[in-house]
Amino acid sequence: MPGSLRSSLGPVAGLAALVVAVLGVLYAGDGEPGRVDRWVVRPTADSVRPPWRTVALALDFLGEPVGAAMLLSAVVTGCLLLRRPRSAVLAVVGAGLTVGTATLLKSLVGRTIHGDDNLSYPSGHTAFATALALVVALLAAGRLGLARTAGASLVLTAALVAGASMGWAQVALGAHYPTDVLGGWCTALAVVPATAWLIDRPADRPAARPSEGSAGPPNDPIAAPPADAGRTDRH
């Protein structure tokens, strides 16, 4: 994560985690759409006809195992070609932790759609797409050397576009409620910045160096000879 963005994305991640928790509590064990869901679902579903249904299916494929693996491989390859190994690690670990967190939350919250076996909150597809968009945007912000405001705007815009696109597909296909999509989007916003910080922390930590003029570490017994070195005791 570019240093200029750490102070900006920290509060965003905290707020996103709060939204995920609040929505999880509100819809725990529920199997019906909420008021906001009812306002969004019907007009969205009614508007999905060819060719838009084909677009929705294509986006949905990118969140399925095969499509997700292809998309993740492309992002990792791009990071390595640009000689950004930490970004490649973030893509794999960040996306994995985001999807894992979404999967765990589904079991904990227990919200369902179309039957008791279809856990829906939060949307894993939306979380995955948003996570990868965040990784790419962070990489771009670092490469371009963007300042805090410009970099944060780029990162949040990329996350919004990716999350909205995949979220629209999930709602349009009837796979998730709109609030599930919001929860998935916020899950990525909470997990990816935290993961980036954890990856950067050991890599950015300065190595311990001996003080100038000393032959070794301060407590190194080899560096400091004993006080009576060179003196012969006589009895």
Image (cartoon, helix red, strand yellow):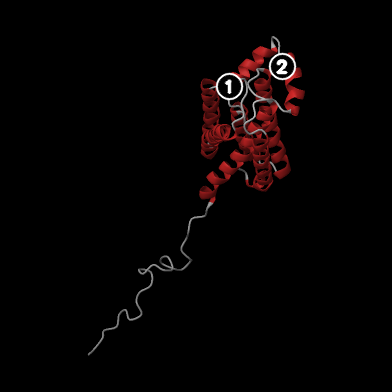
Label 2 packing within 10 angstroms: few (<14), some (14-19), many (20+): some
Label 1 packing within 10 angstroms: few (<14), some (14-19), many (20+): some
**Place of residue 23 in the rendered image (x, y in percent of width and height, measured from the top left):** 67, 36
| Badge 2 or badge 1: first in the primary sequence | 2
Question: Mark 2: which amino acid?
Answer: Ala
- Give the numbered dot on residue 62: 1
Residue 171 in view in this figure: yes
Quadrant containing the C terminus in the rendered view: bottom left
State yes or no: discs 2 and 1 in contact (Cβ < 8 Å): no
**Place of residue 143 in the rendered image (x, y in percent of width and height, measured from the top left):** 62, 38
**Place of residue 97 in the rendered image (x, y in percent of width and height, measured from the top left):** 54, 36
Q: Secondary structure at mark 2?
A: helix
- 97 on left or right of 219: right
Report the residue at 71% width, 16% height from top.
45
Q: Secondary structure at mark 1?
A: loop
Quadrant containing the N terminus in the rendered view: top right
